[in-house]
Amino acid sequence: MPQFFSKKQYQQVAELFGLGAIRGIITYFRKGYQTPKVAVETGRGKFIIAKHNLSTKKTIISDMKIVPRIALVHEIQFLNTLKNLPVPHYLHSKHRRYLEDFGGYTVSVYKFLPGHEPKRMTSKMVYELGRFVGALHAQSSRFKKPMKGRRRFYDLNPRVMTLMYCSAKQQTHPLLKKAVEEVRRGVERNRLPHGLPKGPIHVDIKPDNELFIGEKLAGIVDFGNVYVDSLVFDVGKTIMWNCCAKDQLDTAMTKKFLQGYLAKRKLNNKEWRYLEQATLFAIYSHVWVDLYHIPLKYVPESYTLFLVKTFLPIARSIEKEHPNILKFVGMS
């Protein structure tokens, strides 16, 4: 369970960032592994205060418990370059810093984004998501800083796969044990080639990180996994989370999402050619990373079982029945 500061300490953080006196109840957000967050309201408005446990340690394999300070600095720098997008925008402290050391941790503050996580997706909502992702990629492709220290969860090159396999194969649940080899082959078969347009990508746009007011997109949060990679991979990842249902890709929803995306950014010929592969890689790589994390006790076994039961049938369906995703959704 995340460990929060006391109310008195949150008031001290609010003063450090020039927010003023906190009014009324503090709202605690108990999701997330390493970053307890609260919403506070002051005379200046509503804000999120985040408590970070940062590190200077470097690893070859992405580690959910290790977040280098420089990685968060680059995340904030990137987010603060984005214009007219409903994403977290960070405030600097009275010392003109976006990160402050406080109580043995690091704290940051950004403006609160309204809205609610969607219970179900509609065609209008996925169109809104498409427009957001297209606009995000159009801007992020111009962000040229290297974003050093970012956790590249899905940079699954052969060396990383070999290292991760030692942990992934240590499953105790029969279904997960059976899935390891299938998922490993799926990652290796669908790994994306070099030469695709790149930029910072969110890589986790799913209902848990989406905020809607009605059917209007009000915010995308949790850029904790952002790193530089192929933009089309981010497209595939968003399709995976938002355009699949009942063990298969939803053709109408996928088409609507892509229409929204194309309204803000055009895919080049190579991206179109690898869109299906990007969607498959999104599924296999996501499941693989969690298979790796289970023996390390970074994620619960029950969550990975949900992924395997939900998304592996979809990947099998795409590979077996729909060899060309563009023809499948009627956009070839």
Image (spheres, rainbow, N blue to C red):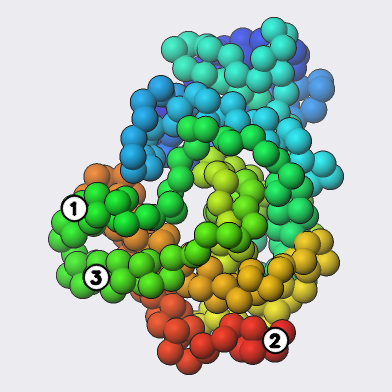
**Which mark is nearer the camera, 3 or 2?**
2
**Which mark is nearer the camera, 2 or 1?**
2
Q: Which residue is mark 2?
A: 332
What percent of the width, then of the height, locates residue 104? 44, 12
Q: Which residue is mark 1?
A: 166
Q: Which residue is mark 3?
A: 181
Quick check: can you spot residue 37? no
Q: CA distance from mark 2 to mark 1?
A: 41 Å
Amino acid on which disc 1 is placed: Cys
Task: Residue 2: name its quadrant.
Answer: top left
Element assignment for label 1: helix
Dot 1 crowding, Cα within 10 Å, few <14, some 14–19, many 20+: few
On screen, residue 137 above or below 223: below
The residue lying at 76 percent from left, 53 percent from top is 138
Quick check: can you spot residue 322? yes
On screen, residue 51 above or below 190: above
Q: CA distance from mark 3 to mark 2?
A: 33 Å
Task: Residue 173: name its quadrant.
Answer: bottom left
- Left or right: residue 77 compared with residue 226: right
Dot 2 crowding, Cα within 10 Å, few <14, some 14–19, many 20+: few
The residue lying at 67 percent from left, 30 percent from top is 77
Q: Residue lying furthest top in this view?
A: 95
The residue lying at 43 percent from left, 52 percent from top is 155
- Left or right: residue 192 compared with residue 161: right
Residue 174: mark in rendering: none
Q: Earlier in the sequence, mark 1 or mark 3?
A: 1
Amino acid on which disc 2 is placed: Ser
